[in-house]
Image (cartoon, rainbow, N blue to C red):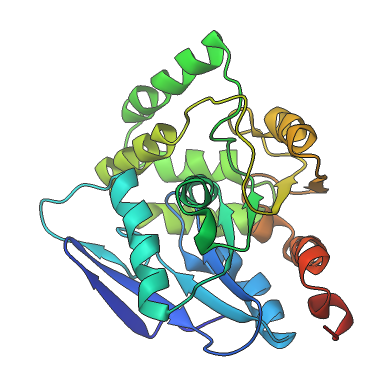
Amino acid sequence: MVTLDRVLQRPTASIAYGDSGQGSPTVVFIHGAGLDHTTFDDQAHALVTVGARVVQWDLRAHGRSTLAAGTRFTAEDAFNDLAALLDETRVTDPVLIGHSLGGNIAQAFVRMHPDRASGVVIVDSAWNTGPLSAASHFLLGLAAPALALIPARSLPGLMAKASAVTPAAIKRATETFTRMPKQTFLDVWRATSSFIAPDPAYRSPVPIGLMRGRDDQTGNISQAMGEWAAAEGVTAHVVADAGHIVTWDAPAQSTATLCEILGQWHPRLVSGEE
């Protein structure tokens, strides 16, 4: 893990982040909705150990990062925070690794700025530009209103049970989701949905890796990731005994799988040699 001992001041938020400072390649982790940087703590520790430079951060309104009074979470602001973070840390060619919402942000970022990343790994995230049936589009629009009907006291536990499969991960997710006010979570959920914009001809302009928990039942991720992998000509890596928060359900296997993906682009991470 990397200690979040720095703060990036943004016009409407304070972004807590940490930077291991040295190593290659540089990996920037982006966590999912309602979670925080600890989503990737085990993987960050492993990568620093084998010589990578790692940047971890909490999205605005998540974890140790804050929002200015009266400000609501938007996809555009989160996207721009990532760009500002890369500027602040002087990172020019990172591998972006995003989970869930973080994966949506990473996809959008490399699409707009393909020269600012050397690769992207998507973990249990929806395919931004993938095909979307009329039924799926309809359900996507219903998600936030449906969540709004759930009592605030019940929402964290329900979301945790939908996101993780092991008792330890469910407990951890419940505790983390509980820290976010319901209205903020609904704004974050809407932001996640806003990244979905089907474009059948689009392909990633940078090397891409895909990874998910075998038992991820959120949205259409499990089905779509196989189709996505086929479209990109890559492998969809599936981690057994894990749900949507794969890195908490199966941390060791998630780390091994992630290193396998990164090792295709940076063999030193696997072999110890360039």
**Image position, residue 120 (x, y; %):** 62, 56
Q: Quadrant of the N terminus?
A: bottom right
At 75% from the left and 62% from the top, the residue drawn is 258
Q: Can residue 242 be seen in this view?
A: yes
Q: How many marks?
A: 0
Q: Which residue lies furthest to the left in this view?
A: 70
Q: Which residue lies furthest to the top in this view?
A: 134
**Image position, residue 100 (x, y; %):** 54, 46
Say left or right for 215 vs 87: right
Say left or right for 184 vs 118: left
Viewer-closest of 151 and 134: 134
Say left or right for 134 vs 223: left
**Image position, residue 273 (x, y; %):** 86, 86
Q: Is residue 59 visible?
A: no
Q: In which quarter of the image is the C terminus?
A: bottom right
At 70% from the left and 54% from the top, the residue drawn is 207
148 in relation to 91, above or below: above
Q: Which residue lies furthest to the front in this view?
A: 115
When asked about the image quadrant of residue 65, the answer is: bottom left
When asked about the image quadrant of residue 247, the answer is: bottom right
257 in relation to 219, above or below: below
Q: Which residue lies furthest to the right in this view?
A: 271
At 29% from the left and 75% from the top, the residue drawn is 8
At 68% from the left and 46% from the top, the residue drawn is 165
